[in-house]
Image: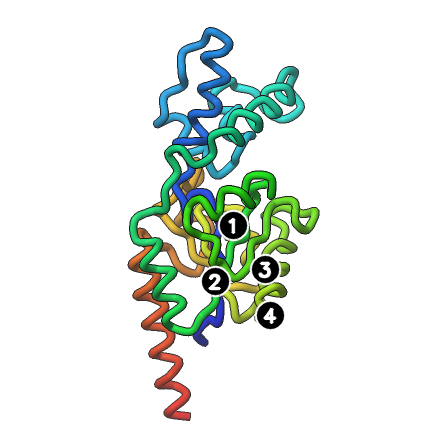
Amino acid sequence: MPAPRAILFDLDGTLADTAPDLAAAVNWLRTERGLDPTPYEVLRPTASAGARGMIGAAFGLAPGDEGYEELRLAWFERYQSAMSTYTTLFDGIPELLDGITDAGMDWGIVTNKPSRFTDPLVPQIALAHAGCIVSGDTTGFAKPHPAPLLEGARRLGIAPEQCWYVGDDLRDIEAGHAAGMVTVACVWGYCGAIEPSTWGADYLLETPAQLLALLGQVSEAARQAEQAA
């Protein structure tokens, strides 16, 4: 396998542990309505699904249900007012990004998170140096559609087949395959209710350090193959 020239990342559950703030926003809505908070361990696995996941877990409502849209808009307001109170990068992510840069590769963010949240959040969590930032409303399509990933590659000026895509949700892997990219399922993220081993990712990794090591191995193998040619 040729070494990649760029790594594109999902944001929530991949680079950043945003679940605490996402959960706090939906429990804010519950307490306003006189309800007990939903346990964090129930909310966390749904974090990659954003409002749909949080409202579904906390209120048992899905898009199209009566009352869902009102809660969705209210959740947006609560979350936007406190997006980085508890959010942090996952352990090992700063070192991973530094290692990617040191290896001469580019990296960027492709997320389904709307730009109204992505644009202010990214600099607050030390990710402003991303080579590109593609939000859920940048292209008019959201993952699993490949358009956001293809836009990320375009902004980096790198062919999609020379990019890897890393994410913690089945939609990430589906979008990566559709875009012609090597896919990495990161088990350190939220992963949802579907077992990651069934997603069909090219790689299944448990820590950012494993990804950095894998990139080093692939790059070294590619270098040796080039020398032998």
Judging by the rendered image, the residue that carries numbered circle 4 is: 157
Q: Which of pointers 4 and 1 lies earlier in the amino acid sequence? A: 4
Identify whether 129 is placed above or below 217: above
Q: In this picture, is 57 found above or below 205? A: above
Q: Which residue is mark 2?
A: 107
Look at mark 3 in the image and give the residue it sits on.
152
Q: Secondary structure at mark 2?
A: strand
Quadrant location of residue 209? bottom left
Q: Is residue 108 left or right of residue 116?
A: left
Q: Quick one: label 3 or label 4, which is nearer the N terminus?
A: 3
What is the CA distance from the residue labelled 1 to the residue labelled 2?
A: 16 Å
Q: Quadrant of the C terminus?
A: bottom left
What residue type is disc 1 on?
A: Asp
- Residue at image mark 1: 172
Q: Amino acid at mark 4?
A: Gly
To which quarter of the image does residue 40 belong?
top left
Question: In the rendering, at what x and y percent does residue 11 appear?
Answer: 47, 47
Q: Dot 3: what SS?
A: helix
Q: CA distance from mark 1 to mark 3?
A: 14 Å
Residue 112, horizontal then vertical, whole percent: 57, 44
